[in-house]
Image (cartoon, rainbow, N blue to C red):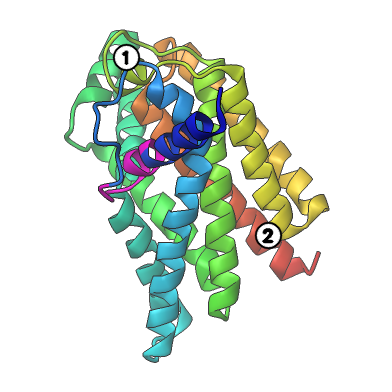
């Protein structure tokens, strides 16, 4: 492959990843062909960088106008939700409703496909927002919040291509089925980007702990998805992002509080 073609493919993959992860109109002009989303999955951690920067900017503005850390943390979360269009929160709610309220594989998939939110989904969203807010509120300055948000959003999205590669789609239609399964190379590059940013933001020792924590999330989530619905879906991928994001935020908070 010539250098120009390689650069063009990388740019296309980045645009696909950003368009999937945010509301930004960054997608390529030509329609996305089958398999292109799976190929571009390696770039999802890069898209996470934009999401984290948005939250960090919201927090910085809030503190500059005199708001204390607690409401500033709320606005930081609001910024990440707005730029993503709450796509991962929607996946978390649908997954909680389906796995919690369904009695069998087909019913669980049917509930997850329903856009309405139920009790399990509402509780999952509330818990997710509270945990993330409380983690961010422990930091006292915008730089610490920015670091935590960037590490969490980049690393959390590195888990998605791994799950897509390890676990096949649960059904023949839907977002995940249309995206396809990435090659191991795409999953490996995505995981490497996540680890490198963990190392950049937390240091090598903490990055290894974080990577092991995220690997555990992928393994448990893949096992749960396979057992409950026979594979992964777009909602399950969104829920994994939320779980992984929370895991990294809690790791960062724990290391800051203990001074490790």
Instruction: Kindly report which numbered mark, 1 or 2, lies closer to the viewer in this rendering.
Output: 2
Q: Which residue is painted at 76% across and 67% down in the image?
A: 258
Task: Provide the residue designation for mark 2.
Answer: 201
| Residue 47 visible, this angle | yes
Where is residue 13? Give x, y as percent.
Answer: 43, 34
Looking at marks 1 and 2 on the same chain, the residue that comes earlier in the sequence is marked by 1
Q: Nearer the viewer, residue 238 or 181?
A: 181
- Which stretch is magenta? 16-25
Res. 103 mark: 1
Q: Which residue is painted at 51% across and 72% down in the image?
A: 137
Number of residue marks: 2
- Residue 5 relative to residue 190: left or right: left
- Residue 52 relative to residue 235: left or right: right
Where is residue 199? Give x, y as percent.
Answer: 73, 52
When the figure is inspected, residue 129 is found, relative to residue 238, above or below; the finding is below
Where is residue 64? Give x, y as percent.
Answer: 42, 88
Q: Which residue is painted at 58% across and 75% down in the image?
A: 143
Res. 127 mark: none
Q: Which residue is painted at 39% across and 17% down in the image?
A: 35
When the figure is inspected, residue 225 is found, relative to residue 157, above or below; the finding is above
Residue 74, quarter of the rendered image: bottom left
| SS for dot 1 | loop
Where is residue 212? Give x, y as percent.
Answer: 72, 37
């Amino acid at each position: 492959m010539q250098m120009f073609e390689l650069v063009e493919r990388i740019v296309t993959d980045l645009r696909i990843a950003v368009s999937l992860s945010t509301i930004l109109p960054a997608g390529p002009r030509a329609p996305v062909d089958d398999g292109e989303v799976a190929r571009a999955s390696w770039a999802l951690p890069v898209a996470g960088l934009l999401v984290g920067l948005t939250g960090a900017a919201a927090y910085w503005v809030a503190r500059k106008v005199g708001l204390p850390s607690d409401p500033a943390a709320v606005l930081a979360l609001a910024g990440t939700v707005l730029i993503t269009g709450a796509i991962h929160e929607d996946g978390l709610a649908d997954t909680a409703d389906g796995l919690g309220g369904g009695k069998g594989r087909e019913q669980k998939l049917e509930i997850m496909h329903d856009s309405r939110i139920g009790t399990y989904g509402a509780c999952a969203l509330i818990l997710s927002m509270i945990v993330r807010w409380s983690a961010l509120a422990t930091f006292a300055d915008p730089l610490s919040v920015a670091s935590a948000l960037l590490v969490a959003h980049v690393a959390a999205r590195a888990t998605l291509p791994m799950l897509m590669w390890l676990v096949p789609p649960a059904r023949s239609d839907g977002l995940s089925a249309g995206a396809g399964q990435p090659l191991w190379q795409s999953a490996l590059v995505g995981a490497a980007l996540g680890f490198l940013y963990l190392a950049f933001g937390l240091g090598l020792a903490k990055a290894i702990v974080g990577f092991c924590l995220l690997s555990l999330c992928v393994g448990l989530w893949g096992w749960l998805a396979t057992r409950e619905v026979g594979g992964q879906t777009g909602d399950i991928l969104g829920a994994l992002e939320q779980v992984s994001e929370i895991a990294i935020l809690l790791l960062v908070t724990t290391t800051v509080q203990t001074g490790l």
